Image: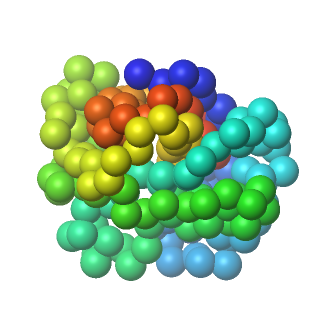
Amino acid sequence: MLDAVWTPFVYAWPLSHLLLAYKGGGRPQLLRPLGSLLAQHLPAVATDGVDRVIPVPLHERRWVHRGFNQAEDLARVLGRRRGLRVDTRSVTRVIATPSQQGLSRRARRANLRGAFEATMDLSGQHVLLLDDVMTTGTTLNELADVVRRAGAARVTAVALARA
């Protein structure tokens, strides 16, 4: 379970169009403006006391297919702007799950069960999870459970937009 969630925007036009163009349309030049939007509109309290930012990891197969992880890219922009440590090694995606798009909350939960695995001890830390879009919160909550089992004391989340 998450202690807090921040989503500065609603997933609607024009942001939805820009995110889709970046994520699926091969438009890497959109990263900087999207990351800047997140950094500028995220309240300072969202990153206060954070020990590390963990972007939602992609399975290796999806990484190879897409060539990048949009959550990781956004996390790196936010990390540079806010002086935060971005950690891509403490949690991995061990199951190549199908897309969550169009699935019910229950189906999303079943789809993600066991998909993530912690690889490091996070005892006592404040971990900020980061994703591009939050729909039902299933992905971030599943990841939060894994991070808590690894010892995190506080787990918060940020997504650029909320669907």
Q: Residue at x 84, y 51 (%)?
A: 40
- Nearest the viewer among 46 and 70 is 46
Q: Quadrant of the C terminus?
A: top right
Give percent across and percent down for residue 23: 49, 65
Q: Is 61 placed left or right of 7 in the picture?
A: left
Q: Residue furthest front?
A: 124
Q: Is residue 19 above or below residue 130?
A: below
Corner quadrant of residue 6:
top right
Quarter of the view holding residue 80? bottom right
* Place of residue 128 in the rendered image (x, y in percent of width and height, measured from the top left): 56, 42
Left or right of 137 in this view: 37? right
Total residue callouts: 0
Residue 22, picture quadrant: bottom right
- Which residue appears at 77% of the width and 56% of the height? 82
Question: Which color scheme is applied?
Answer: rainbow
Q: Position of residue 158 (x, y in %)?
A: 60, 40
Tell me the quarter of the image containing the N terminus.
top left
In the foreground, 81 or 27: 81
Point 48% across, 54% down: residue: 55
Tell me: residue 24, above or below residue 142: below
Q: Is residue 12 left or right of residue 134?
A: right
Q: Is residue 79 visible?
A: yes
In the rendered image, residue 5, in percent from the top left (x then y), is placed at 59, 28
Residue 12 appears in the rendering: no
Residue found at x 69% / y 39%: 49
